[in-house]
Image (spheres, rainbow, N blue to C red):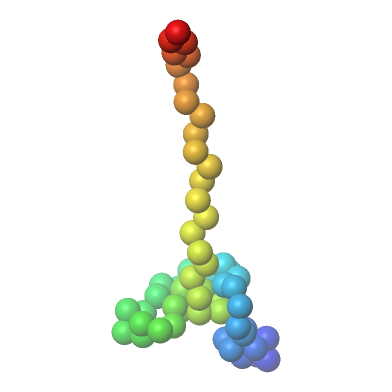
Amino acid sequence: MVKKIFTQFSLGEASGVRARNKKGRFVADDPNTPNVNEAYVDGKKPKRKRKPAAKKRGRPRKSRK
Protein backbone atom coordinates (compact mmCIF):
# COMPACT_ATOMS: atom_id res chain seq x y z
CA MET A 1 0.00 0.00 0.00
CA VAL A 2 2.84 2.38 0.79
CA LYS A 3 4.40 1.61 -2.59
CA LYS A 4 1.10 2.45 -4.31
CA ILE A 5 0.87 5.83 -2.55
CA PHE A 6 4.53 6.61 -3.26
CA THR A 7 4.17 5.90 -6.99
CA GLN A 8 1.16 8.20 -7.29
CA PHE A 9 3.12 11.24 -6.14
CA SER A 10 6.46 10.44 -7.73
CA LEU A 11 7.91 13.05 -10.06
CA GLY A 12 9.79 12.03 -13.15
CA GLU A 13 9.32 9.76 -16.10
CA ALA A 14 6.40 7.40 -16.50
CA SER A 15 7.10 3.79 -15.61
CA GLY A 16 4.98 2.29 -18.40
CA VAL A 17 3.55 -0.37 -16.08
CA ARG A 18 -0.10 -1.05 -16.82
CA ALA A 19 -2.61 -1.18 -13.96
CA ARG A 20 -4.56 -4.38 -13.38
CA ASN A 21 -7.74 -5.19 -11.49
CA LYS A 22 -8.29 -8.06 -9.04
CA LYS A 23 -8.80 -10.57 -11.86
CA GLY A 24 -5.51 -9.57 -13.50
CA ARG A 25 -7.08 -7.77 -16.44
CA PHE A 26 -5.93 -4.37 -17.68
CA VAL A 27 -7.78 -1.32 -16.34
CA ALA A 28 -9.05 1.27 -18.82
CA ASP A 29 -8.56 5.03 -18.49
CA ASP A 30 -11.54 6.96 -17.10
CA PRO A 31 -12.35 9.89 -19.47
CA ASN A 32 -14.00 11.85 -16.61
CA THR A 33 -10.59 12.46 -14.99
CA PRO A 34 -8.43 14.25 -17.60
CA ASN A 35 -5.39 14.86 -15.36
CA VAL A 36 -4.89 11.23 -14.19
CA ASN A 37 -4.50 8.15 -16.37
CA GLU A 38 -5.91 5.16 -14.48
CA ALA A 39 -4.62 2.73 -17.11
CA TYR A 40 -1.07 3.07 -15.72
CA VAL A 41 0.19 2.39 -12.19
CA ASP A 42 1.81 5.79 -11.69
CA GLY A 43 -0.93 7.69 -13.55
CA LYS A 44 1.30 8.80 -16.43
CA LYS A 45 1.38 7.49 -19.98
CA PRO A 46 4.94 6.84 -21.23
CA LYS A 47 6.29 8.77 -24.21
CA ARG A 48 5.94 7.00 -27.52
CA LYS A 49 9.18 5.58 -28.88
CA ARG A 50 9.91 6.21 -32.54
CA LYS A 51 10.94 3.32 -34.74
CA PRO A 52 14.12 3.79 -36.79
CA ALA A 53 13.63 4.43 -40.49
CA ALA A 54 13.53 1.28 -42.58
CA LYS A 55 16.28 0.63 -45.09
CA LYS A 56 15.24 1.12 -48.69
CA ARG A 57 15.02 -2.02 -50.74
CA GLY A 58 15.40 -2.59 -54.44
CA ARG A 59 17.88 -1.98 -57.18
CA PRO A 60 20.37 0.85 -56.60
CA ARG A 61 20.18 3.89 -58.88
CA LYS A 62 22.71 4.39 -61.67
CA SER A 63 25.24 7.07 -60.90
CA ARG A 64 24.93 10.13 -63.13
CA LYS A 65 28.06 11.78 -64.49
In depth, the one of 58 and 44 nearer the eye is 58
- Residue 7 point in image, percent of width and height: 62, 84
Residue 4 visible, this angle: no
- Residue 48 picture location, percent across and down: 49, 59
The picture quadrant where one finds residue 36 is bottom left
Q: Observer-nearest residue: 3 or 62?
A: 62
Q: Is residue 61 above or below residue 30?
A: above
Horizontal side, residue 19 vs residue 37: left or right: right
Q: Is residue 61 visible?
A: yes
- Seen as rendered, the residue at the extreme front is 65
Q: Residue furthest right?
A: 2
Picture residue at 51% right of the left edge, 46% below the top: 51
Q: Nearer the viewer, residue 37 or 22?
A: 37
Question: Residue 56 placed where, x, y %?
Answer: 47, 26
Indicate whether 5 appears above or below 30: below
- Residue in the image at 53% along x and 42% along y: 52
> Going 46% across and 73% down the picture, which residue do you hit?
39
Q: Residue 18 placed where, x, y %? A: 54, 69
Q: Nearer the viewer, residue 18 or 57?
A: 57
Name the image quarter holding the N terminus.
bottom right
